[in-house]
Image (spheres, rainbow, N blue to C red):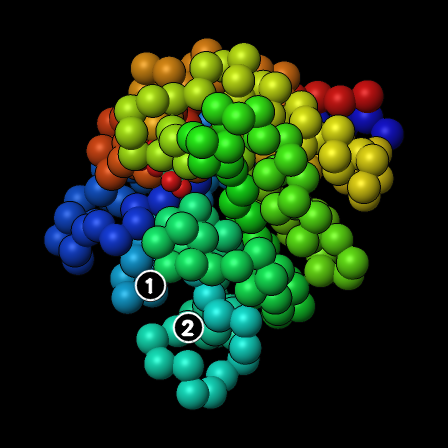
Amino acid sequence: MTGSRKFFVGGNFKCNGNKSSLQTLIESIIKSTLPASEIVDIVVSPPSIYLEYVNQLVGQRVQVAAQNCYSETKGAYTGEISAEMIVDIGLKWVILGHSERRNLFKESNQLIAKKTQHALSQGLSVIFCIGELLEQRETNKTEQVLDEQLGFLLNGVVSDWSKVVIAYEPVWAIGTGKTASPQQAQDAHAFIRKWLSEKVSKEVANATRILYGGSVTATNSAELSKQLDVDGFLVGGASLVASDFVTIINTANPKSYL
Ligand SMILES: O=C(CO)COP(=O)(O)O
């Protein structure tokens, strides 16, 4: 079946911003010239305390994602938010398995799978993040690590693949200014697409968006976006600068498939 993958640019604000700076940032983004909604999904992800505030500012063209959620509906889980709460405030997206959750907050593959299954069961779409550490890349373990992290999506975890976007974010490239080269990104993305084809189906492999994240900037995004299997970006630091984020969004380059 032929088709094309709509580009996807996410802005992960991480633990940054306040009401005033977020208002300025969002207003500058939405008043900029942006590609049509058929070309690119634009999703921003502020800290959870500002989700509803930002959602009131974004208008129709930009969507809002939570940066995390727990695997249970409700209960004695101090500090957590649930997928149900994200749905309740009218949002459709959540980021899960970000490397900062995995490495700083010691989230396991098992927990991330549980969260993913639960978020999907509540109708949320999930930006599922994977990526290798520097030492794993240097010892040629990148594909093994990606295979292991992706494996946790099998066995009934994903009920609807059209609600999953995969973000490849090599940990050594996050916040370091060291971007993967276009070829390194393409190689990892091609591996992920082949994995989807072999472990899920050809249709899912064709249709699933695979994003690159890790020191994406206004200057390197155009070259990265030309790569055949790069369907978008998850942008950290550069998403906090409206003009840079808008430049990155405008490098949107949707890919067709046969
Ligand atoms: O972690 C990231 C996006 O989720 C990438 O962060 P930077 O763009 O700041 O490297």
Q: Which residue is mark 1?
A: 48
| x 54%, y 77%: residue | 72
Q: Whereabouts is ligand 1, in terms of quadrant?
A: top left
- Residue at the extreme left of the image, as rendered: 20
Is residue 115 depicted above or below 145 in this figure? below
> In the displayed structure, does residue 33 sit left or right of residue 183?
left
* Callout 1 amino acid: Ser
Crowding near the residue tagged with mark 2, few <14, some 14–19, many ≥20 C-alpha atoms within 10 Å: some
Does the CB distance between marks 1 and 2 fall below 8 Å? yes
* Callout 2 amino acid: Ile
| x 66%, y 68%: residue | 121
Q: Nearer the viewer, residue 126 or 144?
A: 144
Q: Nearer the viewer, residue 192 or 104?
A: 104
> In the displayed structure, does residue 137 sit left or right of residue 215?
right
- List x then y, in percent, for residue 183: 54, 13
- Residue at the extreme bottom of the image, as rendered: 76
Q: Which mark is residue 81?
A: 2
Crowding near the residue tagged with mark 1, few <14, some 14–19, many ≥20 C-alpha atoms within 10 Å: some
Q: Secondary structure at mark 2?
A: loop
| x 57%, y 30%: residue | 142
